[in-house]
Image (cartoon, rainbow, N blue to C red):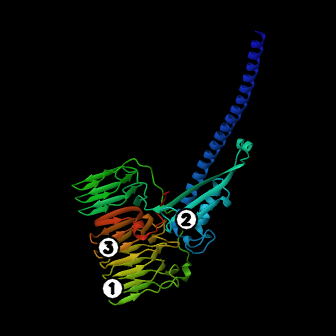
Amino acid sequence: MRSCIQAALQRSRSEKGQILIMAALSMTVLLGVVALATDVGIMLHEKRVLQTAADSAAVAGAQQLGNAASNPGGGSTPCHTSNNNCWYQAAIADAVQNGVPSADVTPHNPPSIGPHKSSSSYVEVIIANAQPTFFMRLFHISSMNVAARAVATNVPGSTCVYTLGKSGTDISLTGSGSLSIPTCGITDDSSSSSALTLTGSGSISAKNIQIVGNYRKTGSGTISPAPSTGASSTPDPLASLSPPSYTPGSCGAGISYTGAGSHTVTGPSTPGGVICYNGFSNTGSGSVTFPPGIYVINGNFSNTGSGSISGTGVTFYVPSGSFSVTGSGALNLSAPTSGSTNGILFYQNPSDTNTMSFTGSSSSTVAGIFYAPGAKLSFTGSGGATYDTDLIVGSLSITGSATINNYAPSSGASPLATPTLVE
């Protein structure tokens, strides 16, 4: 009996020892799992932080790339030609603002991998760094690599007609004319109960119509879709645009053409340069050609002739005067696609309230932005004309018929394009 009891006690002590060993091993494994879970959780949080920073940096780089403007330090080199230019610096600066060291940020244009590789209209941002671990150091793992990647590009804005007046009728269409904007929308900032008015048998159609106030329709005309009223006011989307630099005393004599014949205006010495004239008037039947560049018209810009006016890569700026382009001749004009006036065709000083009058014949082709935020645009369209344009004006009065497409798709670059993440 005694020997049986001793054997039982020995087995009990042996089992207790085994349990202690198994418990110790289990605690080690459990601590390892807890350590791994804790550090992985920290890394996942850091991954989300870096992804947010990469997304923001890619959008900032794409926005600067779309602007195709000068470097942060000045100059006129396009953003996408070198890693030292504005799209690159904008991406780096944005990431740094989000707490990422610049050494951890690598922007690419075009992207280095993915479906948009080799496309120069996309900006890729890769952020990578080694994050220190905490509990995993017990297992001799002192850091883990964390990375994030984002790609952004510019897409056409959803609005191509902005009227910025805060009261009264901002948009008026009378008679049997029509305004068709199939690819984009209308934003009317007036708080008036008749902010948009349609009188007669005409029609207004757009992708969407947003009005701060309300609208009024009389006659058999149609508005499609039904406007959204009570919308929030939209600020001037080009409020940061700087006017061309010029010295009034150095402007050349005013230009005046009459009669027939072909005329070529003396342009700037370089395509992106500025030249100033004390007015422009064309009453003849001949053709007028403007070489590429920025034309400051220190006075009035008037065309009442029957001849054509042509120009590629041109901007017309009136600091204090008026635009009156009402002749019957064809207009074949396009704005610059880079530089300080990228996308801007007609530019009237925001403080200038003189009415801008514009008539396009059926054979006209116009590509560029009308920017007159403090003035009324009296627009007479023609059904056969091609308008790839955005209108940013104080108010808009329309007669005739016009189909407008927003400017960005035709130009490939526009200051109104919206940077958007695609990867």
Q: Is residue 353 visible?
A: no
Q: Which mark is residue 12?
A: none
Tag of residue 360: 3
Tag 1 residue: 284
Which three-letter amino acid code belongs to the residue tagged 3?
Gly
Q: Mark 1 to mark 2: distance in Å?
A: 55 Å
Asked if one can make out residue 404 in the rendered structure from this viewpoint, the answer is: yes
Category of crowding for the residue at label 2, using alpha-carbon neighbours closer than 10 angstroms: few (below 14), some (14–19), many (at least 20)? some
Identify the residue shown where x is 73% and y is 31%: 24
Image location of residue 217, percent across then percent down: 27, 53
Q: Residue 345, position in %: x, y?
A: 43, 72
Mark closer to the chain start, 1 or 3: 1
**In the rendered view, would you say 279 is above or below 166?**
below
- Classify 378 as above or below 224: below
Q: CA distance from mark 2 to mark 3?
A: 45 Å
Which residue is denoted by mark 2 in the rendering? 112
Question: What kind of residue is marked 2?
Answer: Ser
Viewer-side residue, 335 vs 281: 335
**Residue at 62% across, 65% down:** 89
